[in-house]
Every structure is written in C-alpha cells, then in structure tokens.
Amino acid sequence: QKEVEQNSGPLSVPEGAIASLNCTYSDRGSQSFFWYRQYSGKSPELIMSIYSNGDKEDGRFTAQLNKASQYVSLLIRDSQPSDSATYLCAVNFNGNNRLAFGKGNQVVVIP
Amino acid sequence: GAVVSQHPSWVICKSGTSVKIECRSLDFQATTMFWYRQFPKQSLMLMATSNEGSKATYEQGVEKDKFLINHASLTLSTLTVTSAHPEDSSFYICSARERGSNEKLFFGSGTQLSVL
C-alpha cells in the first residue's frame, strides 16, 4: 500500500464551483498533514496545514481531516482559473523526519 | 513565509559532467534540508535528508556516491550530481524546515537538469 494516495484523475470544474480533492494515508499514527499547490514547472507552495480532526478554513480553502478513517481532503470554493494546478497531499508520519507526498491531483478550472 | 533560494533554476550539461545545485534558507536557520526529485507528471520523490554538520541520510535506491550532499551551515545545503547521465535529467527541488517549526516545509524554486 502506498503511503499517501491520491487516486482521482484530472478534475475539471467550472469557474465559481467547488473543487473537492481527497487523500488517504497508511500510517494511523500520522500527526501532520499538508496540502501543496504546484504549477507546472514550479516548486510546490504550501497552502494548508492541518493537525487535528475536523475542518480548517483559510480563505477559499478548507481542509478536512478524519484520522479514524485516515483521510484528508481539500475543498476549493469559488474556483478561479488561477487555481488550475496540481495539488499535492503530504503527510508527516509519526516519529519520522520526512514528508511523504501523494502523486497529486490536477485541477483545471474552466472559465 | 520563509524563503528558500535554489540555484541554478535550470542547467544543461554533457553526459559525464558534474552539476552542483545550491539551496539556501534566506531568513531562517534550517537544521534540516530535504532533496527531492520529480519526473514529469510524477510526485516528489525524497532523495535524501540533509542535517547540518552531519552526513546525509539517503532514501533506499539513491546512490550516495552519485548524489553528494553537503550541509555545511545552517543556511546552505548543496547537491552535486556526479558523472551525470541522461537518466538523471529531472526536476530537483530542495526544501527546508525551520528550526522549531511544526514540520512545515518551504521549498526552493527547483532546478531543471537536462543531461545531453
């Protein structure tokens, strides 16, 4: 089983709609979870971090964490064309000094 | 947020040459830096963890003699790709964790390496 899984394919959403991304992880003891945005040819940019169960909102972004089910999700409200990018889920495993990344989900916002 | 500077942003070299990539934390002390490699449409793959003043820890399958890492100070880590070959062509990204931070990573801008 992969450490961090992001299985859905490219996501196309119309401008103004909600984009929903999901991520599951293998290590039940994980404590820290992150969403990064990566534009083509650029390095990842941290957009959200979440450490406890529930929702965390930051502007148009909401991260949701459910440790019992071992998933973390990201919602992008009022999607804008500038949100078109690949979104990487990252998990810091318990007692481990490194982040494991999912393969990413490409989001395309259609004007 | 914290700034990590990575240089060069792109490099083209001949097969068999060595290439050095620098990663600097500009406004914070980074006790730990990480080096990632990313192939097109793939995720970030951790190559090694670099700790200031000590030897780097390499991930399984990464040749330490080919990818030399030096973390000489709290603000600078370098990755040298020795005797580069076309299969080493990739996007290399460094990241740094600020001392005392809660695991947040800040990424450099990346280096696109093309080996001819």
Image (cartoon, coloured by chain):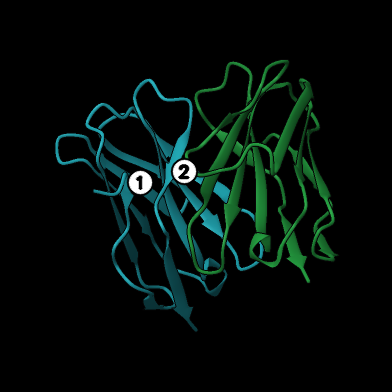
Q: CA distance from mark 2 to mark 1?
A: 7 Å
The picture quadrant where one finds residue B101 is top right
User: Label 1: which residue?
Assistant: A63
Asked if labels 2 and 1 share a chain, the reply is yes
Residue A100 versus residue A39: which sits nearer the camera? A100
Q: Classify 10 Å Cα crowding around label 1: few (below 14), some (14-19), many (20 and above).
A: many
Picture layout, residue A104 above or below residue A57:
below
Q: Drawn colour of chain B?
A: green
Amino acid type at circle 1 is Ala
Amino acid type at circle 2 is Met
The chain that hosts pointer 1 is A
Residue B26 versus residue B13: which sits nearer the camera? B13
Count the labels in the image: 2
The picture quadrant where one finds residue B69 is top right
Looking at the image, do the residues carrying marks 2 and 1 touch, with CB atoms under 8 Å apart?
Answer: yes
Give residue A63's position: percent from left, percent from top: 35, 46
The chain drawn in cyan is A
Give residue A106's position: percent from left, percent from top: 44, 69
Pointer 2 or 1: first along the chain? 2
Picture layout, residue A44 above or below residue A49:
below
Residue located 69% across and 44% down the image? B66
User: Label 2: which residue?
Assistant: A48
Residue located 68% across and 63% down the image? B89
Residue located 76% across and 20% down the image? B74
